[in-house]
Image (spheres, rainbow, N blue to C red):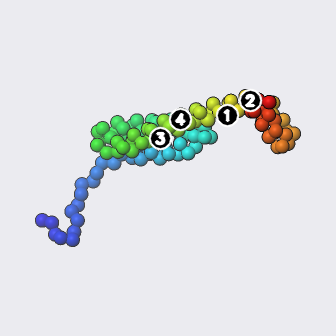
Amino acid sequence: MHTPGTTAARPAAARNTPATAAVVLGTLSLFTSFAVVGGLVGAAGLVTGTIALRLSGRTGTGRGRALAGLLLSLAAIAASVLAAAFIAWYANHTQECYRPDGLHQYVECVRRNLSGH
């Protein structure tokens, strides 16, 4: 019998810790994707998210977090690839500017090479 003012004990719910880890890794990878490191963290998030998604099918918990972790990780990997491509493009277009003759000369050289003049 339930007494007013007391709470009934609930059965322990199954936990999906990999789903939480996938969201954390996905978020971390997205914030570090501009430094290209996010791609590696994103790969770990993909693996963890896949494990969490499979576990959610068995336990019925954590599906939303697993999907969020997967999507964040995929976005981070895509952003890391774009960042790496931009860095390679920038280095290719400004390679003659990498002489240690001062910051002002470097800035002028980059400006000249990127503007096409």
Tell me the residue at 80%/34% (across/down). Answer: 112
Position of the C terminus, as image quadrant, is: top right
The amino acid type of the residue labelled 4 equals Ile
Q: Which residue is mark 4?
A: 77
Secondary structure at numbered mark 1 = helix
Q: Residues within 10 Å of mark 3 (few under 14, many from 20)?
A: many
Whole-Å distance between the Cαs marked 3 and 2?
Answer: 31 Å
Of pointers 4 and 2, the one earlier in the residue sequence: 4
Question: In this orientation, does residue 40 appear?
Answer: no
Tell me the residue at 82%/38% (across/down). Answer: 108
Secondary structure at numbered mark 4 = helix
Whole-Å distance between the Cαs marked 4 and 2?
Answer: 24 Å
Whole-Å distance between the Cαs marked 2 and 1?
Answer: 10 Å
Position of the N terminus, as image quadrant, is: bottom left
The amino acid type of the residue labelled 2 equals His
Asked if disc 1 and disc 3 are in contact, CB closer than 8 Å, the reply is: no
Expressed as whole percent of the image width and height from the top left, the position of residue 51 reads 39, 37
Of pointers 4 and 3, the one earlier in the residue sequence: 3
Secondary structure at numbered mark 2 = helix
Residue 87's label in the rendered image is 1
The amino acid type of the residue labelled 3 equals Leu
Q: Which residue is mark 3?
A: 72
